[in-house]
Image (cartoon, rainbow, N blue to C red):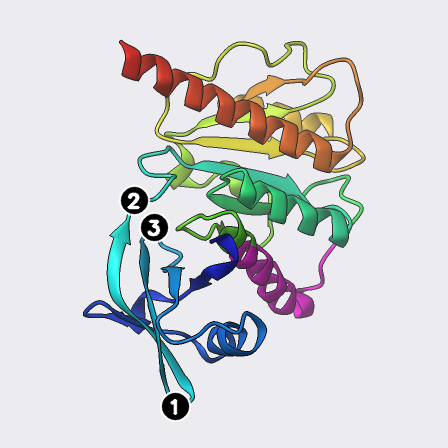
Amino acid sequence: MSRRRFHVPGELIHENIAILPREQAHHLRHVLRLQEGDAVEIFDGEGAGYSGRVRCLGDDVHVENLVGMSPPEKDQPPVILAQALIKADRFEWILQKGTELGVSEFIPLEARFSDARIAESRIAGRMERWQRIVREASRQSCRFSIPEIRKPMTLAQLLSLDELSRFRGFFLHENASERWSSPAPVAPGYVLCIGPEGGWHPSEADAAASAGFGLYHLGPRILRAETAALAAVTLLQFQIANYRLQTDKA
């Protein structure tokens, strides 16, 4: 069923009827070759998902008789991945796989040692491409929500965000004295900071520690940025799921 999922913005869903955007309608009719009455799923990208049946009205495609579905990520605390900018293909791979692993928001960071920079004139186009990647990854991985992607910012700007002040922060740093091995403490949400290929500058690590982030390393091996990012997300998601399982059993 994962190939028969379509993203339909909430403003196109009314009274148990969803109107597929033109691109999605073309994909349904001419790529998947679905027919009138076929069962499909849709999601609005904001946490709601539905099953329904295809109805073709001229060039338009509707999904009717919508039935709400329970999202797999229901009640899960947000996990924000603040990833230092790296080469474009590797950064996009992180967006795709991070979405599949349940990241709720991505924050591209302009770190001191980042080997990739994005000119202001190119940010809009780059973000449009990034949003297509996470939208498709959300569809493929049966998510009902699409991760938010913020405009690139500096670490200082990230650390000053008031809305993240209640979240638990993890700053992954190869020179940290403590290995990340203990379970993540319960928190309203989590922020993972992953550095560039050149690592963090000592001043960046000091700033993160001063802001209350825990500084950790992932073991004796030196990992590529994209490997560290997905290893950290996987570890954190496992800890969150394990805590919830133990809580449910109690």
Left-right relation of 212 to 153: left
The residue that mark 2 highlights is 70
Tell me how far mark 3 sits from mark 1, CA to CA. 30 Å
Residue placed furthest toward the left: 15
- Is residue 211 part of the magenta span, yes or no? no
Give the class, few, some or many, for how many residues have Cα within 10 Å of label 3's Cα (few <14, many ≥20). Answer: some
> Start and end of the magenta stretch?
117-136
Tell me how far mark 2 sits from mark 1, CA to CA. 32 Å
The residue that mark 1 highlights is 58
Is there a contact, CB below 8 Å, between mark 2 and mark 1?
Answer: no
Find residue 138 and report its horizontal and vertical position in percent: 50, 52
Q: Which mark is residue 47?
A: 3
Is there a contact, CB below 8 Å, between mark 3 and mark 2?
Answer: no
Is 84 placed above or below 64 here? above
Provide the secondary structure element on which disc 2 rests.
loop
Residue at 22% across, 67% down: 16
Residue at 58% across, 73% down: 31
Is 136 placed above or below 176 here? below
